[in-house]
Image: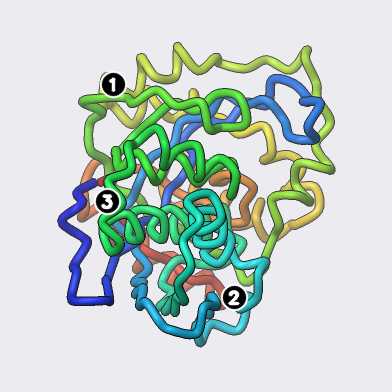
Amino acid sequence: MSSAAIDVVMDKINLKSPAKINLYLEVTGKRDDGYHNLETVFQAIDLEDKLSLELTKEKSIKVICRHPDVPLDSSNLTYRAANVLFNKLKIKTGLKIGLEKQISVAAGLGGGSSNAASVILGLNSLLGLNLSKEEMLEMASEVGADVPFFILEENCALGRGRGDELTVLNNVPEFWYVIVHPNIKISASWAYQNFKLNLTKKKPGVKIFIRSLMGGNVEQIAPLLYNDLENVIGASYSDVDYVKRVLMAKGIKAVLVSGSGPCVFGMVQSKREAEIAKEQLDKHLLRARTFVCHSR
């Protein structure tokens, strides 16, 4: 991911904010702080929101977005990110955050977390703060568990702990994805609250998965894609299981729910495969949104 996506003009900055999918997600235990310990592989994709940050004299944070499912108050992760940075550094200024959403909301694609990371990265540039990556990662962890991945500005990473203990995975082969968003919303908190840790369940293991991922062969990767939350989601939302079945019926072998869902992705080797799959899916899944994406 390139910081060239940032464009500074006077007291305003424009940014692009990418989505992610989870190629692997294993819940390894419950934490004392209420979160779960994870081993997950984050992959950034080229589906993006647009953000603008503008300094104002009002000494308040204002979020502007036309999407009906995006909160405009202090519960919005972009607001929280700005608030954490301002409080930590004792900065007194007003800020107007403009959001133009392309990433589906509450969908397992990390849109809110990515937006929050873009606010921290953008304010660092806009205000000339010269914050180190470590300082920004610390702030990001306060905002949300997935936010640090987007601060890294890397294409792929292994996340441990809450998902915020990150190891960059270099030289991961590029893949194409067809992503389907059923016409439902699922909160991450609901998915984790309803997950029951089953230590006897057979899991491929993240090291074996990463080794296969590096090989770049989708057919070999397919049986190792894994998400512990998938059964929880499928048990309550039949639409998600239906989307998976349709993808597989179209000949896509590498299919998985991303994060806490409900988005389902199919991994393929070429853009043409993804485009053909999208054309077919659009005829069968009339209420769903489908996207063709590329790993960044």
Near mark 2 (Cα within 10 A), the count class, few <14, some 14-19 or many ≥20, is some
Q: Residue at x 36, y 73 (%)?
A: 53
As drawn, 75 above or below 296: below
Q: Earlier in the sequence, mark 2 or mark 1?
A: 2
Residue 159, x across and y down, in percent: 50, 28
Relative placement, left or right, of 151 versus 193 is: left
Camera-side residue of 178 and 193: 193
Camera-side residue of 136 and 107: 136
Q: Residue at x 84, y 31 (%)?
A: 196
Residue 3, x across and y down, in percent: 20, 51
As drawn, 200 above or below 112: above
Task: Tell me which amino acid carries mark 2.
Answer: Val
Q: Earlier in the sequence, mark 3 or mark 2?
A: 2
Q: Which mark is residue 70?
A: 2
- Name the quadrant containing residue 102: bottom left
Measure how far apart labels 3 and 1 are at the Cα level. Answer: 16 Å
Measure how far apart labels 2 and 1 are at the Cα level. Answer: 36 Å
Q: Earlier in the sequence, mark 3 or mark 1?
A: 1
| Secondary structure under the numbered disc 3 in the rendered image | strand
Residue 35, x across and y down, in percent: 74, 35
Q: Which residue is mark 1?
A: 214
Q: Which mark is residue 294?
A: 3
Residue 183, x across and y down, in percent: 62, 71
Residue 225 shows in this picture: no
